[in-house]
Amino acid sequence: MTTGMRVGSGKSLRITLGALAALALSSSFMSAPAVADGKLEELKKQGFARVAIANEPPYTEVKPDGTVSGAAPDVAREVFKRLGVGDIVASISEYGAMIPGLQAGRFDAVTAGLFMKPERCKAVAYSEPILCDAEALLVKKGNPMGFASYKDIADNPKARIGAPGGGTEEKLALQAGVPRDRVIVVPDGQSGVKMLQDGRIDAYSLPVLSINDLVKKANDPDLAVIAPVKGAPVYCDGAAFRKQDADLRDAYDKVLAEMKASGDFAKIIEPYGFSAAAAMSTTRDKLCGG
């Protein structure tokens, strides 16, 4: 976790000293685990919910002026607003640190494209699905090593793949047999593109929408996208809460269902390229293996 950010009433989050002060003032409230059925009331009185985010467009994007936009925080902002929590304070976190930070009470929720997997479902209380996507590989033009799957990378002893530390793509590469020393942890998307361009990795893996966003911004004709990755599943994320805050999760789900039914959910996520129909076609129980 690094920078604290506070969300205003508009469509963006902004880094402010006020957000940092709010976090400091709230520490006394959060020093002990909250009683589950009082968590929402606590957040209402506090005036904001603390959420973990990533810097991975279009899920979340931190702009040079400190504002943050993206489908995940936009949905979270609206749901919490309808629950009577007027604001959210967001902190950037690596994916691998999100669940430990949530469990330690540093966040009230994770709203960052943290895909549901059975092992994660055992650790946190997920909402119903919000953002769904498939996996992609960013490679040099012409795909010189012929990658179509993570196994193709594993089978080539010279191939190196970049992926977010603790993220789904890192785990998929390792599960496919790519040796640990050939799975390179990449801190952010821009670094992944640069490492590929410089030849330090031979493929960079992120969800399709994230890779497409990077390619658009890079404007480099020598890059190519392989999508979807053969054999990789389609994933959906959800807002993640502590197990003891399941009542807050249930309240979140109720508002989320109302937004899906009214069409408000689609209005938020579809401009970012996500499909509301995809999120509404599956359930938390299916994705978590329940």
Image: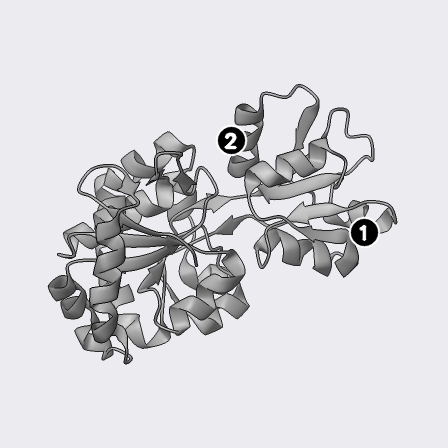
**Residue linked to disc 1:** 154
Identity of the residue drawn at 20% across and 58% down = 48
Residue 45 vs residue 125: left or right? Answer: left
| Closest to the observer, 209 or 217 | 217
Q: Closer to the camera, 98 or 261?
A: 98
Badge 1: how crowded within 10 Å, few (<14), some, or many (20+)?
many
Image vertical order of residue 273 relative to residue 83, above or below: above
At 85% from the left edge and 49% from the top edge, which residue is drawn?
155
- Name the element at disc 2: helix
Cβ atoms under marks 2 and 1 closer than 8 Å? no
User: Which numbered disc flags the more N-terminal residue, 2 or 1?
Assistant: 1
Q: Position of residue 170 (x, y in %)?
A: 65, 55
For the view shown, which residue lies furthest in the right direction?
157
Task: Say what amino acid the circle numbered 1 marks.
Answer: Ala
The kind of residue on which mark 2 rests is: Asp
Residue 131: x and y in percent read: 42, 46
Q: Which mark is residue 213?
A: 2
Q: What's the residue at 17%, 42% (across, down)?
A: 9
* Identity of the residue drawn at 49% across and 55% down: 115
Picture coordinates of residue 231 (x, y %)? 69, 48
The quarter in which the N terminus is drawn is bottom left
What separation in Å lies between label 2 and label 1 (alpha carbons)?
26 Å
Q: Residues within 10 Å of mark 2 (few under 14, many from 20)?
A: some
Left or right, 290 with reference to 179: left
Q: Is residue 281 left or right of residue 28?
A: right
Instruction: Decide: is 11 above or below 257.
Output: above
Residue 167 visible in image: yes
Give left or right: position of 191 versus 147.
left
Quarter location, residue 51: bottom left
Q: Mark 1 falls on what kind of element?
A: helix
User: Up-down: is 125 above or below 210?
Assistant: below
